Image: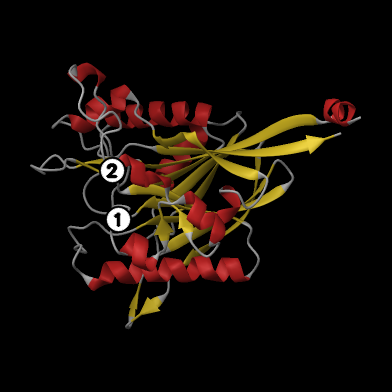
Amino acid sequence: MLEDIDQQIIHSTKSCRIGWWNTHLSPPKGSSLPVEERALVLETIVILLTKCDIVCLGEVSDEDLNWLAEQFAGTPFAVKDMTRSKTPNKFNLGVIYNEEIATFIGNEFSIPQIGGDNYKISCRLDFFIHQEDYFTILMSHWPSRLLKRDDSEIRGHYGAALRRDVEDLMRRGTRYLVVLGDFNDEPYNHSMTTYLRGCRDANHVNLNPDLLYNPFWKHISCPKGYVISPETSHPTGTYFYKSDNLHRWRVFDQMLFCSSFVGGSDWHLNEKETGVYRYERLVEAIKSSQSKLDHLPIIAELNKESKNG
């Protein structure tokens, strides 16, 4: 009898793949990218969209997003402008998503005041995935360490303010939450751990739903360690700092996940398909002294397993 029941159960999986990339198309300071590098950015975004259903973008202007919208006209991919470039608190963000998978519901900017100053903390994106579940993404791009040093308490303010956004969403019953962006801090920095409450232990997050799981801890060191052949060695990290004479690759770009994605629901993070996306032409450009590009994209896959029968 049990075997008959098992045969009637059909296992199906639905996926949602999310990406983030600091494109450097229009940095907060300095000039926009030259034409040849813009071509590589477009090429990279096209590849990302073959692998992702939602791609969040940093350092983009409204002109960049209009240009991208023209490139993807007539495809299932829609472009949304999240720049707010005409305000003192400049957001230079955007998102491209597959309308066959995700329905855009709305967005909201978080600009809290701390000690009399306004802080650009996050842009919230709400999506309806597969016409079944609501996903919320908090997208952030924190200031460079050149402007706000690691030992400056201001970096703690950013982590604490984003944490308040997370807690507010949890109190309001948000079930599926992803926090992503370029934090200009590594997973072990206090802004990401003490303040934001990012944890490297998925089981601990499952037992303590107030925490966020950060799988990007594993990208701090080279995944293969030392290998004899340099050709098979893969450096780690998402940001390449050409002037650093110690650690050139840093893990500044990260995604953190609420407990629903690590055992708290039918949606599960697929660790094997989550990490830094190393497109070789982009890697070569980033390492070149002639290029202004400095970040690699990151991607994550979320799978929903359901039983019908």
Name the residue located 43 percent from the left edge and 32 percent from the top edge.
Answer: 45
Q: Is residue 264 left or right of residue 113?
A: right
Q: Position of residue 259 (x, y in %)?
A: 56, 55
**Colour logic:** secondary structure
The 10 Å Cα crowd at callout 1, few under 14, some 14 to 19, many 20 or more, is some
- Give the tally of numbered discs: 2
> Which quadrant, please, contains the N terminus?
top right
Residue reaching furthest to the bottom: 116
Q: Is residue 107 left or right of residue 83?
A: right
Q: Position of residue 257 (x, y in %)?
A: 51, 52
Q: CA distance from mark 2 to mark 1?
A: 9 Å
Above/below status of 141 relative to 2: below
The amino acid marked with disc number 2 is Ile
Above/below status of 264 relative to 226: below
To which residue does mark 2 refer?
220
The amino acid marked with disc number 1 is Tyr
Residue reaching furthest to the right: 1
Q: Is residue 208 left or right of residue 146?
A: right
Q: Position of residue 17 (x, y in %)?
A: 55, 37
| Residue 125, visible in the rendered structure | no
> Which quadrant, please, contains the C terminus?
top right
Residue 188 is tagged as 1
Q: Earlier in the sequence, mark 2 or mark 1?
A: 1
Name the residue located 30 percent from the left edge and 49 percent from the top edge.
Answer: 252
Q: Quarter-wise, where is residue 269 in the image? A: top right
Residue 7 is tagged as none
Q: Position of residue 87 (x, y in %)?
A: 39, 66
Name the residue located 21 percent from the left edge and 64 percent from the top edge.
Answer: 148
Q: Quarter-wise, where is residue 47 in the image? A: top left
- Of residue 149 and residue 5, the one placed in the foreground of this image is 5
